Amino acid sequence: MGEEVPSAMQLRQLEYFVLIWDTGSFSAAATRLYVSQPSLSQQIRALEKELGSPLLERGHHGLSLTPAGRALLPIARRILHAVQDASDAVRHVVDGSNGDVHVLTVRSVAAGVLPPSAARWHAMYPDTVLRLHDFSHRRDLEAATRAGRGDLSVGPRPVGWDGPVVSLGYEEMVLVGAEEHVPGTVADPAELAAADWVLYEPEQGMSEVADWLAATIGFAPRVVARTGQVAAGLSFAVEGLGVTLAPANAVPGGWARHTRRVGSGVFREIVVYSRQAPPQLADRYRELLAGIELPLLAASSLPPGALRC
């Protein structure tokens, strides 16, 4: 048989040591702990043996700390407090009273869809932190979700997803240009083929939407500029470089008159999804997203003939 390995000091022994000192006697500590005094004395002797030094001395005037006991006492208190803090932190996460919620999303959704939910969430759970991690393209979002980098993901509906998926609604894609229009003005799809276009680099998810629209309607965009940012594409379009396609919720309010609906409308579904059932706190955020008013349309509110990308 191998040599017996001495047991390390235990948290229980540190707790006993601190309580004996705080109560002033072994008997008082034993009463508080609901253990026998001999058992308590045995645990302290084991701790002293482990440390190689006496910790407490009994005298005519009661207990006193040895030099080793004085060195150990503040450290033992810190250890016990740290263990309690760790236990409290985990319990709070499990019961959903505080903690972090990691939400993965795409940039247009982070800026145009989630702000109302973030404000409501903070009002409901002020001791939590909502951590948003945004991506330029849906494929990067889906890859990060599969890799377990977040609790929840909010973005375009993933293809062939096996985990939980909850629909939040549809965002409209609008045509943006330099000309101002009366609200509700519709762009004839035939105009799209004749226009100069500000489109997006392949790493920007809106490039996928624009390519899909061109293929669906049947035209080849005449590209005059490409950018990796929706905000830059909007600025170029409003300045007259060409037209662009963008989520309506990403267009600043002052530029609303520069937008037009494309035909009967082009819409993209936004969902909240995850690899598996989310932790309790994240599940509460998912419920909030599904229950509050977001700048999205319900499927039943889409106009007849609308295109869904």
Image (spheres, rainbow, N blue to C red):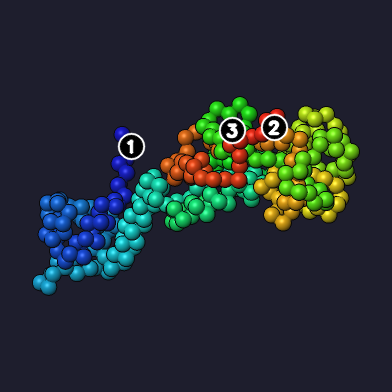
Q: Which residue is mark 1?
A: 2
- The residue wearing badge 2 is 306
Q: CA distance from mark 2 to mark 3?
A: 11 Å
Residue type marked 2: Ala
Rendered view: 259 above or below 16: above
- Observer able to see residue 208: no
Q: Nearer the viewer, residue 182 or 279?
A: 182
Q: How many marks?
A: 3
**Circle 3: element type:** helix
- Find numbered disc 2 in the image and state the secondary structure of the residue it sits on: loop
- Identity of the residue furthest to the left in this view: 60
Which percent across, then down, holds residue 20?
Answer: 19, 61
Q: Where the C terminus falls, by quadrant?
A: top right
Residue 308, numbered label = none
Please say if the residues under marks 3 and 1 sit with CB atoms less than 8 Å apart.
Answer: no
Which residue is the site of mark 3? 300
Give how far apart the Cα atoms at labels 3 and 1 are. 73 Å
- Judged left or right of residue 179, residue 97 is left
For this rendering, which residue is in front, 261 or 40? 261
Horizontal arrangement in the rendering, residue 109 relative to residue 23 (left or right): right
Q: If you read the primary sequence from the N terminus, does the residue marked by circle 2 or circle 3 appear first?
A: 3
Q: Which numbered disc, 1 or 2, marks the residue closer to the eye?
A: 2
Pointer 3 local density, CA inside 10 Å: few below 14, some 14–19, many at least 20: few
The front one of 3 and 228 is 228
- The N terminus lies in quadrant: top left
Quick check: can you spot residue 274? yes
Residue 168 rendering spot, x and y as whole percentages: 56, 38
